[in-house]
Image (cartoon, helix red, strand yellow):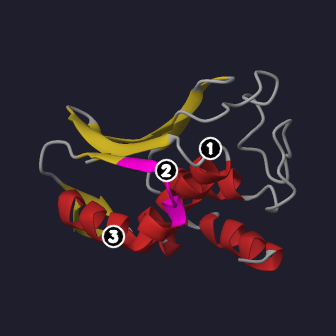
Amino acid sequence: IGLCEHLLDLSRLENSRNVRKQPVDLEAFFREFLDQVRLLVGKRELRFHPGTRVTLPVDPDMLRRILLNLLDNAVRHTPEKGRIEIGWQLHESGVEIRVRDNGEGIHPDDLAHIFEPFYQGHNRRGEGSGLGLALVQAMVEAHGGKVTVTSTEGQGTEFRISFPL
């Protein structure tokens, strides 16, 4: 996806009426999604941790894009023999989706800035526009959710996305 498309997506998300929520069975959604992304993951181990069966009111296309962005980042920063984990947990207030890898991690100076549009961190690989994580954050917030990240250099990164039920 090109820079112009990313910018258009960001501007569209400023108006949350563009979010088309519908009931999504997370288990069925994830099984289909993971079948589609197996090639992207390559030789990395992909572990799926399904949580309690739940139907989440979410825009399925946006959820797919959120997960694709996070998975793409995990693949770019995790060695071929590394591990990527994805799944969810049900909480009283909603659902928390996690994407975790055991890759290179994020430089501590970058953590506070990774959701800023066009930010290019220390682990820059020469690809991307610097808008992927800004889009992730905008799409999650358009659903009334929140995205957080924890990372340790040399050990990996975990993104947590909380959606209300």
Q: Residues within 10 Å of mark 1 (few under 14, many from 20)?
A: some
In the depicted structure, whether residue 2 falls above or below residue 140: below
Which numbered disc, 2 or 3, marks the residue closer to the eye? 2
Q: Earlier in the sequence, mark 3 or mark 1?
A: 3
Region in magenta: 40-46
Tag 2 and tag 1, C-beta contact below 8 Å: yes
Q: Residues within 10 Å of mark 3 (few under 14, many from 20)?
A: few
Residue 123 in percent (x, y) is at 81, 39
Residue at the image position 81 percent from the left and 73 percent from the top: 3
The disc placed on residue 44 is 2
Residue identified by numbered label 1: 79
Label 2, label 1: how far apart the Cα atoms are:
7 Å
Label 3, label 1: how far apart the Cα atoms are:
21 Å
The disc placed on residue 140 is none
Does the magenta run of residues contain 165? no
Residue 69 in percent (x, y) is at 58, 59
Name the secondary structure under disc 2. Answer: loop
User: Which image quarter holds the N terminus?
Assistant: bottom right
Asked if residue 79 lies left or right of residue 4, the reply is left
Q: Hey, what amino acid is under mark 2?
A: Arg
Q: Nearer the viewer, residue 51 or 147?
A: 51
In the depicted structure, whether residue 101 falls above or below residue 66: above
Q: Nearer the viewer, residue 81 or 22?
A: 81
Residue identified by numbered label 3: 35
